[in-house]
Amino acid sequence: MRKLLVTGGAGFIGGNFVHHWCREHDADRVIVLDALTYAGNRATLATLIAEQRIEFVHGDITDTPLLDRLFREHAIDTVVHFAAESHVDRSIVDPGAFVRTNVVGTQTLLDAALKAWRVDGLWRENVRFHHVSTDEVYGTLAPNDPPFSEATPFAPNSPYSASKAGADHLVRAYVHTYGMPATISNCSNNYGPYHFPEKLIPLIIVNALHGRPLPVYGDGRQIRDWLFVEDHCIAIEQILSADVAGQTFNVGGRAEHVNIDIVRRLCELLDARFASDATLAARFVECPAARGIACDSLITYVKDRPGHDRRYAIDPTLIATTLGFEPRETLTTGLARTVDWYLTNEPWWRSVMDGSYRDWISSQYQRTLT
Ligand SMILES: NC(=O)c1ccc[n+]([C@@H]2O[C@H](COP(=O)([O-])OP(=O)(O)OC[C@H]3O[C@@H](n4cnc5c(N)ncnc54)[C@H](O)[C@@H]3O)[C@@H](O)[C@H]2O)c1
C-alpha cells in the first residue's frame, strides 16, 4: 500500500490524476495538498472527499511546518508534485508568483522529502518524488526542427517556463547531490475534463456556449502537441511503478496541430452536438449553434501574446521503449470526450467561473482585443 502526497490535486491534471489513482489503486492512501488558488477547485474532488476516499489539506507547498507534519503523520512514501502557477499569460503579468510557487515551492517540498526520507545519510526504501513538468522548458521549435528529446537543452522563453525549468534543475540537483529517488516528466499540452476555462480548449467551448468571441492569438498557426489528460495520468502511473529513479521522461500525444485547427474542430463538434440534440439549444440559447449558425462565426483573431512560442513537439521514444507508454486517445476521440464532458458538467464549470475569473477574462479581452 502506497501513501501518496499529491500537490496541486485540486487543479486540472492533479485532479484527473487523483481520480485515476483512486480508481486504479483502491488500497492506497491519498493526501491532497492544494492552496486553492483561482485554478484549484475543491468541486473537482467533491465526491472523493465526501466518500473519505482521500484526505484534502488546504495549504501551501511553501509552508515547511505543514509539509513536515504531513510527511510525519501520514508516513508519506510517494510525492506527486503538480502544484504550480501554470498559465503563461499570467506569468507575463506577475512573474513573482511563479518563482514563489514553482521554484521556492518545489525546493521547499524537496527539502521536506529529504528530511523525512533520508536518515543518517541512508534513504528509506520504496520512496519516490515525482515532479510534473512541461515541454515548454525546451523553448520553441522551427517548423522542420526535430521534436524535443530528453537531451534537448533548456531554453525557456516565458516566466512560466523559466520557473518550471528552475524547478526541474532543482529536482535534478537533489538526485545528483543527495541521491534523491526522484523522477521528472516533461509533458506537452494536456486537455480534457476539469480544465479551467482560461486555457485554449475549455475557453473555446465555454465561450462558444455563451456566444462570446473565440479569441485566437496572432495567425493561429502556433503548433502544439496535444495529449488527453487521462493518458498523461497513465504515463505518470507507469513512471511511478517502474524502477527508474533519477530519470526524466518526455510525454507527448504524437498529435501536432496548429491552434486554429483545434478551434475549428471544437466548433464542428459543438455544431454537430447541437444538430443532434434539441435540448442543447434550450440550455445554451446564446450559442450560435442554437440558431443553426456555425460556431466558427465567433472566431476572432487577437493581438499575439508577447514572446509566443511557435511550435512545441515531443519525441516520446524513451517512454515508449522503456515503459511501453502509448496514448490511448487520438485527438479526434479526446476532443469529442472533452466537448461531451463540458456539455454534461455545466455545474462544475459554472462553479469555477467566479468573480476573479470574470475579472481576469475581461482584463484579457481589454489587453488582446485592442
Ligand atoms: N496543463 C498542461 O497542459 C500542462 C502540460 C505540461 C505540464 N503541466 C504541469 O502540470 C502541473 C499541473 O498543471 P495544471 O494544468 O493542472 O495546473 P492548474 O493551474 O490547473 O493547477 C495547479 C494547482 O496547483 C495549486 N497550487 C498553486 N499554487 C500552489 C501552492 N503554492 N501550494 C499548493 N498548491 C498550489 C492550485 O490551487 C491548483 O489546484 C503543473 O506543474 C504544470 O506546470 C501542465
Image: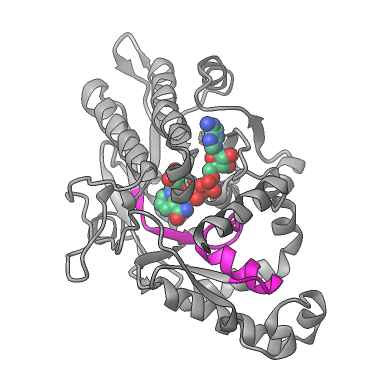
Q: Is residue 76 left or right of residue 183?
A: right
Q: Position of residue 232 (x, y in %)?
A: 44, 56
Q: Position of residue 309 (x, y in %)?
A: 31, 58
| Residue 205 versus residue 92 in the image, above or below | below
Q: Position of residue 84 (x, y in %)?
A: 48, 39
Q: Residue at x 23, y 57 (%)?
A: 148
Q: Position of residue 68 (x, y in %)?
A: 52, 16
| Residue 45 versus residue 124 in the image, above or below | below
| Residue 49 versus residue 335 in the image, above or below | above
Query: Is residue 193 one of those drawn in magenta?
Result: yes
Q: How many marks?
A: 0
Judge by depth and name the residue closer to the eye, 143 or 74: 143
Judge by depth and name the residue closer to the eye, 280 or 311: 311
Range of magenta residues: 186-213
Judge by depth and name the residue closer to the eye, 108 or 243: 108
Query: Is residue 294 one of those drawn in magenta?
Result: no
| Residue 241 versus residue 332 in the image, above or below | above
**Coloration of the structure image:** one colour
Residue 355 can be seen, yes or no: yes
Judge by depth and name the residue closer to the eye, 325 or 209: 209
Q: Residue at x 69, y 43 (%)?
A: 42
- Farthest residue to the top: give it: 120
Q: Residue at x 30, y 41 (%)?
A: 243
Q: Residue at x 42, y 71 (%)?
A: 259
Q: Is residue 210 left or right of residue 219?
A: right
Residue 24 can be seen, yes or no: no
